[in-house]
């Protein structure tokens, strides 16, 4: 996930994003352009806490070419 996309999903500003995931403004400001999995997980967790529709959340958090199909796993 890109930093820009994560910030947009969390409310559109570094300050709002930081508050929603429980870190400082400076921590979010220092995120790399391509977020590592540990930060992406925190972003998605913060969004999940706000959302009742996890399927829409997951689809909006992924680029169209890498969409996740919820409920389908390897057997």
Image (spheres, grey):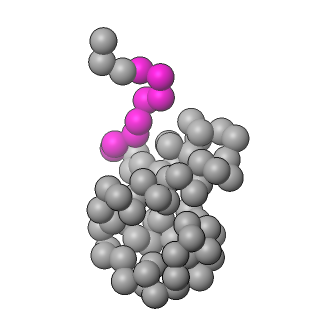
Main SS of the magenta segment?
loop
Residue positioned 53% across, 52% down in the render: 45
Please report the bounds of the magenta region as a residue range: 65-72
Image quadrant assignment for residue 10: bottom right
Q: Nearer the viewer, residue 25 or 8?
A: 25
- Residue drawn at the location 61% of the way across and 68% of the way down: 20
Q: Is residue 27 visible?
A: yes
Compared with 28, 48 (above or below) is: above
Residue toward you, 44 or 8: 44
x and y percent of residue 75 in the render? 30, 12
Horizontal side of 56 relative to 51 (left or right) equals left
Q: Is residue 49 above or below residue 24?
A: above
Residue lying farthest top? 75
Please provide percent x and percent y for residue 44: 50, 53
Image point (51%, 71%), residue name: 7
Please state the horizontal and vertical placement of residue 22, each as a whole percent of the image.
Answer: 56, 70
Residue 56 image-quadrant placement: top right
């Amino acid at each position: 996930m890109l930093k820009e996309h994560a910030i947009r999903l969390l409310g559109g500003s570094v300050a709002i994003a930081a508050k929603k995931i429980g870190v400082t403004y400076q921590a979010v400001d220092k995120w790399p352009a391509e977020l590592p999995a540990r930060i992406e997980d925190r972003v998605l967790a913060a969004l999940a806490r706000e959302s009742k529709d996890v399927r829409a959340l997951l689809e909006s958090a992924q680029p169209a070419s890498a969409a996740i199909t919820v409920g389908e796993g390897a057997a």
